[in-house]
Image: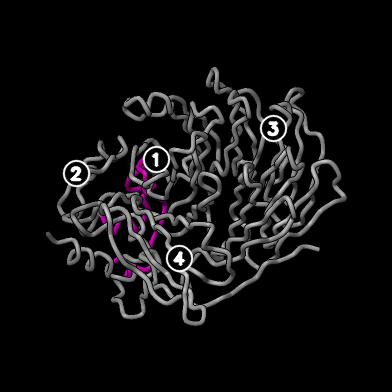
Amino acid sequence: MLAFKWAVLGLYMAKALSVSKALRILFYAFWLLQSAAPVVAFDRVLGHGGPVKDVALAPQGDLLASVSFDYSVVLWDSADFGEKYRLLGHNAPVVTAAFSPDGRFLATGGDDFLALIWDMTAIRNGADPAPIARFVHQGKIAHLSISADSSMLATASWDGGLRIWSLDTMTPITELRGHIGPVQAAQFIENGSQIISAGRDGHIRLWNLSEERYVRSLVKNGWGINALHVDENLRFIAFGGAQGAMKILSLDDRDIAVTLADGRDPVLAINYHPETQKLAFGTASGRVVIADMVHSAVINDFRATNGPVWGLAFLSHAASLVVAGLDDYFTTIPMETINLGGDPLGILGTKQRRFHPDTSTMSNGARQFAKKCSVCHSLDADYKRRAGPSLYGVFGRTAGTAPGYLYSDALKRSQLIWDEKSIAELFRAGPDIVTPGSKMPVQRIKRAEDRRDLVLFLQSATRP
């Protein structure tokens, strides 16, 4: 039986406090333990304009990549979390990232159906960051895996395909199809001669790459599988399902399987630290479960975010865990201070985030803005690195001309003037009709009254 370490020693007492370097906020939380309370210090690192979808640590350990709903990739100094580089190239939210084991490349994948390859050697040497290759699917790219020798990239996509690409020639090698529906994750094994994939169809499938053929299904979960990790040293497959189960399967004997933890919320993220042999799962409810894989025991089980955990990354020597979710920051948590269960960071007591404001006291126009526009757009002169430009002074402005924002060529060529009629039409017909080829996500407001109230709100709220 597994030994679950639960120790709920107290309640969150204080929050907030100091701001440093404008992009970094240091919070202090306290646990109450009789008269003496240990201090838990954790960093919330600001720099994105939308939810952070994934994080990945460079093999050298000095850089942390974060990818976001704001279409950007940011590379941070993993020691002080100062922003080092900002990479722009995706035309939709970026959802996954992976460094090559040799450190030469960073691969990023997004909702724009693209996997972009970045030359890390050139970026580190001061070159203007630009992707050196673009690999295309017909659906969202959900996960990336790079082979141990850094020669191949696997892209798992919602178009149902698992594609293999050469990182030596930047050309396609093959496509593997067998999952019914989206492919959610993949990982190379056996020195790149095989690959394991997980899908929404509930299967974990084994493929022979040298022969480009499907071998067999290793797992028939019954529920979709969202996250996967394979360790060839300890010989296990770890995976998390849509039903909330966090499971371990022997890589050699499929009859040996263990459920590390259960829950009602889908498992969305997984990360493994081979040096310390710690495995972390993240769920849709903000729960993080950490297991010691040597002893197959859960050592931490706590609430880390007020919303889904989309990305996890252990930093050097697993001294800290980085957690990314439905916020425009990521959180770094020192592991030595999180040996408790429950809600040690005081997440449950936090206020509503910008993406989920309390709309009960808002006007209808403000409510429409909060629901439809606020994730991507600022009302201030500064666009705040969000997915879309600032709406400050938008009335009378030619589309594609707000300063500081990187527009699509289609919008810059449109010659559209934003006014009451064009904004109302944008939400009646949709961006795919009014601004075809732009980055705007397709959304519409059905009720004429709601469109009118939104326009009236914007006329007031965006006035210089």
Residue in front for this viewpoint, 40 or 425: 40
Query: Magenta span has 449?
Result: yes
Give the x, y percent position of residue 462. Answer: 18, 61
Q: Which residue is mark 1?
A: 75
Q: Which residue is mark 3?
A: 176
Q: Are circles 4 and 3 on residues that touch, CB within 8 Å?
A: no
Image point (46%, 72%), residue name = 346
The kind of residue tagged 4 is Val
Q: Nearer the viewer, mark 1 or mark 2?
A: 1
Q: Nearer the viewer, mark 2 or mark 4?
A: 4
SS for callout 4: strand
Q: Which residue is mark 4?
A: 40
Image point (19%, 65%), residue name = 461
The kind of residue tagged 3 is Leu
Give the x, y percent position of residue 414. Answer: 26, 40
The crowding category of the residue bearing disc 4, from other C-alpha atoms within 10 Å (few below 14, some 14 to 19, many at least 20), is some
The mark that comes first in sequence, 1 or 4, is: 4
Left or right: where 433 falls relative to 462 = right
